[in-house]
Amino acid sequence: MIFFFVAAIGTYVHHGRRRDTDNQFRHPVRGTSAFMVSLIVGEVGGFAVLLAGFVRAQLL
């Protein structure tokens, strides 16, 4: 998760320097799609782990 946080901040800085922050997907760089898919999987997976822990602690 820390990798994704650092990578996202780096991407924001990169787009800020390019002054194209209105739509970061208009001219994507190589690897943007793969990064976004892995970010989504990581976020959903992380939430699933937290939710499973909550359910286990509260209901089981």
Image: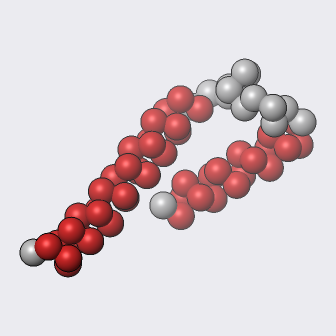
Q: Is residue 8 left or right of residue 21?
A: left
Whether 24 is drawn above or below 60: the answer is: above
Q: How many marks do you count on the picture?
A: 0
Q: Is residue 23 left or right of residue 50?
A: right
Q: Residue furthest bottom?
A: 57
59 or 4, which lies in front?
A: 59
**Residue 40 in the image, given as x and y percentages of width and height:** 45, 43
47 or 14, which lies in front?
A: 47
Q: Residue furthest front?
A: 59
Q: Is residue 47 left or right of residue 14?
A: left
Q: Quadrant of residue 15?
A: top right
Q: Residue furthest left?
A: 60
Q: Residue at x 37, y 58 (%)?
A: 46
Q: Residue at x 72, y 21 (%)?
A: 26
Q: Quadrant of residue 20?
A: top right
Q: Quadrant of residue 38?
A: top left
Color scheme of the displayed model: secondary structure
Q: Residue at x 9, y 75 (%)?
A: 60
**Residue 45 in the image, given as x and y percentages of width and height:** 33, 53
**Residue 18 in the image, given as x and y percentages of width and height:** 88, 36
**Residue 39 in the image, given as x and y percentages of width and height:** 48, 45
Q: Is residue 2 left or right of residue 42?
A: right
